[in-house]
Image (spheres, helix red, strand yellow):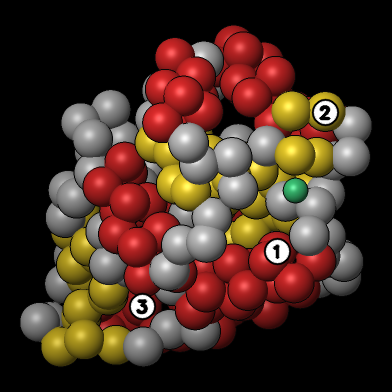
């Protein structure tokens, strides 16, 4: 899962980023409206966490553009402007939820799970292929019923492949799913993650089939 975090205060951004990363979420961090817009145009996000008082304007002004690109994407406003009026304005402007600062990270994670559980996202659906079972909501992987721990990037690659099982996934789509906006991607890094993942999937009778020049396909052996 990939989230756009729009927040200009470094300390707050770091706190949220580390909490999200612990849940195996890719975080694209933007410290202004301009950077947020650029990030939202270059990547698909599963949700947006949006601060209001940003150096170049009110975060709420970004909502119409985000909605135009991705109508069903959950947007949670995180703001020190926590009065009832402010919260009503935020929801009227199209936010799915509005959390007043200060808030606890646990509450934010709970709200995030709640907005991502909505039917449009269908995130709670368990995916199975061969002897592999993947539960997107908790990012858990089982092979023949036994839970296995995958490093974060392998988990993200598997999520991207299994949600499109039987279809070809382009290299670009995979890179977007596995790496953040700020990550430097070494040209062969994705291949290294995929080759480690491929070895682990042998036991599940599932293979990552590479189609030269086109992409990758996850299929049952
Ligand atoms: Ca701010």
Single out the mark in the foreground, 1 or 2. Answer: 2
Quadrant in the picture for residue 57: top right
Q: Which mark is residue 201?
A: 3
Q: CA distance from mark 3 to mark 2?
A: 47 Å
Q: CA distance from mark 1 to mark 2?
A: 18 Å
Q: Which mark is residue 186?
A: none
Nearest to N terminus: mark 3 or mark 2: 2
Quadrant in the picture for residue 21: bottom right
- Would residue 120 appear left or right of 193 to someone viewing this image? left
- Would residue 140 appear left or right of 162 to someone viewing this image? left
Nearest to N terminus: mark 1 or mark 3: 1
Circle 1 residue = 13
The local crowd at label 1, few if under 14, some if 14 to 19, many if 20 or more residues have their Cα within 10 Å, is: some
Can you give x and y, in whole percent of width and height, for residue 109 in the image? 38, 62
Q: Taking the image as drawn, is residue 68 in sight?
A: yes
Q: How many numbered marks have been drawn onto this rendered protein structure? A: 3
Nearest to N terminus: mark 1 or mark 2: 1
Q: CA distance from mark 1 to mark 3?
A: 35 Å
Circle 2 residue = 57
């Amino acid at each position: 899962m990939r989230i756009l975090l729009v927040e200009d205060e470094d300390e707050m951004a770091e706190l949220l980023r580390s909490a999200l990363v612990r849940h195996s979420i890719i975080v694209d961090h933007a410290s202004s409206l301009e950077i947020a817009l650029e990030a939202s145009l270059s990547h698909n996000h599963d949700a947006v966490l949006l601060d209001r008082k940003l150096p170049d304007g009110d975060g709420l002004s970004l909502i119409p553009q985000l909605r135009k690109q991705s109508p069903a994407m959950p947007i949670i406003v995180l703001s020190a402007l926590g009065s009832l009026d402010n919260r009503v304005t935020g929801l009227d402007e199209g936010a799915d939820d509005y959390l007043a600062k200060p808030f606890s990270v646990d509450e934010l994670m709970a709200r995030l799970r709640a907005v991502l559980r909505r039917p449009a996202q269908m995130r709670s659906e368990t995916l199975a292929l061969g002897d592999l079972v993947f539960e997107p909501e908790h990012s858990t992987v089982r092979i023949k019923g036994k839970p296995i721990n995958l490093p974060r990037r392998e988990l993200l690659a598997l999520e991207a492949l299994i949600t499109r099982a039987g279809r070809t996934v382009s290299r670009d789509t995979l890179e977007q799913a596995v790496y953040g906006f700020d990550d430097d991607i070494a040209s062969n890094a994705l291949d290294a993650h995929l080759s480690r993942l491929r070895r682990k999937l042998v036991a599940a009778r599932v293979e990552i089939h590479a189609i030269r020049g086109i992409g990758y396909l996850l299929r049952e052996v």
